[in-house]
Amino acid sequence: MKNTANGFHRGWAKCTKSPLRLERHAVRALCGAALFWVALGIAPGGAVRADEIQGLYEAEVPVLSQNVEDRNAAISAALLQVLVKVSSRAAVNSAPQLQEVLDSANRFVQQYRYLRADPAQKSKDKDGDAPPGQVLWVRFDEQAINAMLRANGLPVWGRTRPAALVWLALSTRGQRKLVSASSKHEARTLLREGARRRGVPLRFPLFDLDDRKQVQMSDLWGDFADPVLRASQRYKARAVLVGRASRSGDQWLGRWTLYVEGSRHSWETRGAQLSDMIDPGIDEAAEILAARFAQMQHETVANSLLVRVNGIDSLPAYDRTIRYLTGLDIVEGVQPYLVETDSVIFRITARSGRLALAQAVALGHTLASDALLGTVPQPAVFGGATTGETGQGATGVPDSGPGGAVAPVGAADDGMTPAVVPALIPDLVYQLVP
């Protein structure tokens, strides 16, 4: 019992010292639950699973020397790479409002260092010369970059992005092959490099027995969507990109189809080199995905939303949910608003409103949209309905409204008298994914 008592005290101290500002009844409910969970020996934790882009605000640029002139030119080129990834616009360098930004790229630099070029890199520049023997690695200030893009009316695509599963079939010398996850073909390297340049997470099919049972090479080449999309379900990608590349004379011809959330987009690319065909194919896919998922976010636009998350029945689940929500790029603030036995309603401040938040959450794998929508009844709050300076009740909601009665001001605050508070209609409802 001594250890249990110490656990209760630690749980209570941790909860009451939390930097999060809970409504009064939420503090009581959460801390009471904390005592119960601590007594069971449960500790906070839990990893968040999502497709997150690493190094979004970093870039590497070849340099001829370490003198100031070459370094400044390389920093400007590195900033352009980052702006393309973050804004999701390939033509960002032609935006007139950003020319001054590129000319003063140094003010956005957070860190830089010189690295030795990878000896395995065999690519050459447009003039056919061998690349320099060193590269400049640059990391830019994330907040400054985001604020600058928003101030110039450009979108900011957060780190969590939809993964695209790529089925690329190649036809050379009368033979067809698929670029799979284990493929050593140059096309796979080009696809990965192009996706990294645009900040799009790619996945490749295993093309194992399970895949071969569902999709044939003729399905890919004939652009038959049903078998390809069925085989793609196991990879849990938000988008499926199908490519068919063939060599005709001195030209590569690529036919591309992107399937994303019920829509279909098709285009063609061609070029003398394989990279000339693949790079614009990846660029077009990135533009389509960005147009759907990247939000035009402005610092001055923020909305307060009520979001209910079901399945929060322990401190680890609560901790995992809080960390996930606060980690979303468009979220500016998260506060617990109402704590129940197995769910929590959060007050979330998000840029661009409800739709933008729903799209951001949909990209991850932590919360799933719940079919339970509509009114959420609030439990009775014991201790009366003491009103504060805001003119609101103990829950922080207005003292009157549909779905509930108003406890009279001056009601006995004896700790036992239940006060009926209004029902809540959350803006979004989710289920925590185990």
Image: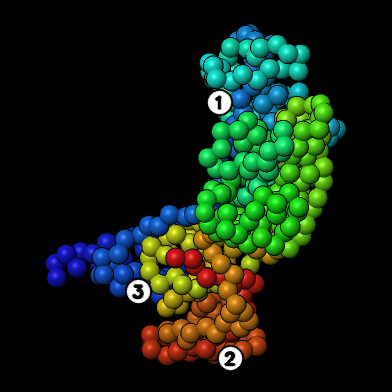
Cα gap from disc 2 to disc 1, whole angstroms? 58 Å
Asked if 43 appears above or below 39 in the picture, the reply is above
Would you say residue 90 is visible in this rendering?
A: no
Left or right relative to 300: residue 266: right
- Check disc 1 and report its element: helix, strand or loop: strand
Residue type at mark 2 is Ala
Q: Between disc 1 and disc 3, whose residue precedes?
A: 3
Give the residue drawn at x 28%, y 67%: 38
SS type, badge 3 = helix
Q: Is residue 341 above or below residue 83?
A: below
| Residue hosting label 2 | 405
Q: Are marks 1 and 3 in contact (CB under 8 Å)?
A: no
Instruction: Check disc 1 and report the residue beneath it.
Output: 111
| Real-space CA distance between mark 1 and mark 3, rounded to the nearest whole angstrom | 46 Å
Decide: few, some or many residues near mark 1? Use Cα within 10 Å; few <14, some 14-19, many ≥20: few
Q: Residue at x 42, y 78 (%)?
A: 341
Q: Position of residue 278 (x, y in %)?
A: 73, 35
Badge 2 density bin: few <14, some 14–19, many ≥20, Cα 10 Å: some
Which of the two labelled residues, at mark 3 and mark 2, occupies the earlier sequence position?
3
Q: CA distance from mark 3 to mark 2?
A: 26 Å
Mark 3: which amino acid?
Gly
**From this viewpoint, is residue 46 visible?**
yes
Q: Is residue 135 left or right of residue 98?
A: left
Report the quarter where the N terminus lies: bottom left
Which circle, 2 or 1, is nearer the viewer?
A: 1
The answer to which quarter of the image holds residue 108 is: top right
Residue drawn at point x = 35 percent, y = 74 percent? 32
The residue carrying mark 3 is: 32
Residue at (55, 43) in percent of width and height: 181
